[in-house]
């Protein structure tokens, strides 16, 4: 599935999703996504990195740290012109559909 088809699938969750690039790599900006963090529902802007980055197979960046979820090591990044946070969450392969990559990364906050 090409990037445009993957983006259309993600727009079922977030109609404002848009493709971005940084350093020649594709990322997907997903503004205002609601997800479960522990026992709380939170809303964050997300940046899905569906390919390898920083020795991870894929990454998910969030606009602000998420409290109420399992404690994890947070790292700050500047990507696509803004600040993001990411937790250490390994093992989400890049060969999955992007919607599945996102779902697997969101498990880090449950």
Image: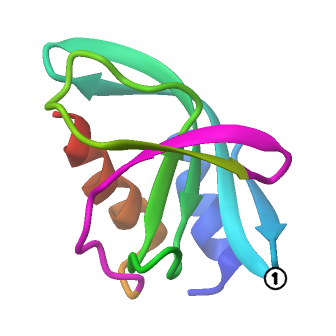
Q: Which residues are magenta?
A: 79-94
Image point (47%, 68%), residue name: 98
Image vertical order of residue 18 relative to residue 95, above or below: above
Residue 81 on the magenta span? yes
The foreground one among 8 and 104 is 104
Q: With 62 as the anchor, is 97 left or right in this view?
A: left
The quadrant of the image that shows the N terminus is bottom right
Image vertical order of residue 81 relative to residue 48, above or below: above
Residue 35 percent location from the top left of the image: 35, 28
Q: With 3 as the anchor, is 53 left or right in this view?
A: left
Image point (80%, 69%), residue name: 22
Image vertical order of residue 89 relative to residue 33, above or below: below
Residue 42 percent location from the top left of the image: 38, 16
Residue 71 on the magenta span? no
The foreground one among 18 and 20 is 20
* Mark 1 secondary-structure assignment: loop
Image point (32%, 81%), residue name: 93
Q: Residue furthest top?
A: 40
Residue under pointer 1: 24
The quadrant of the image that shows the C terminus is top left
Q: With 24 as the anchor, is 90 left or right in this view?
A: left
Image point (40%, 56%), residue name: 102
Q: Quadrant of residue 36?
A: top left
Residue 89 percent location from the top left of the image: 27, 58
Residue 65 percent location from the top left of the image: 44, 26
Query: Total label count?
Result: 1
Can residue 15 be seen here? The reply is: no
| Label 1: few (<14), some (14–19) or many (≥20) C-alpha neighbours in 10 Å | few
């Amino acid at each position: 599935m090409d990037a445009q088809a993957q983006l259309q699938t993600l727009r079922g969750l977030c109609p404002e999703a848009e493709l971005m690039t940084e350093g020649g790599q594709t990322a997907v900006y997903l503004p205002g996504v609601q997800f479960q963090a522990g026992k709380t529902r939170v809303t964050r802007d997300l940046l899905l990195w569906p390919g390898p980055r920083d020795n991870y197979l894929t990454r998910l960046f969030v606009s602000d740290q998420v409290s109420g979820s399992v404690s994890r090591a947070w790292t700050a990044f500047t990507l696509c012109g803004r600040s993001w946070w990411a937790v250490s969450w390994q093992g989400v392969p890049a060969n999955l559909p992007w919607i599945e990559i996102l779902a697997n990364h969101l498990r880090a906050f449950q």
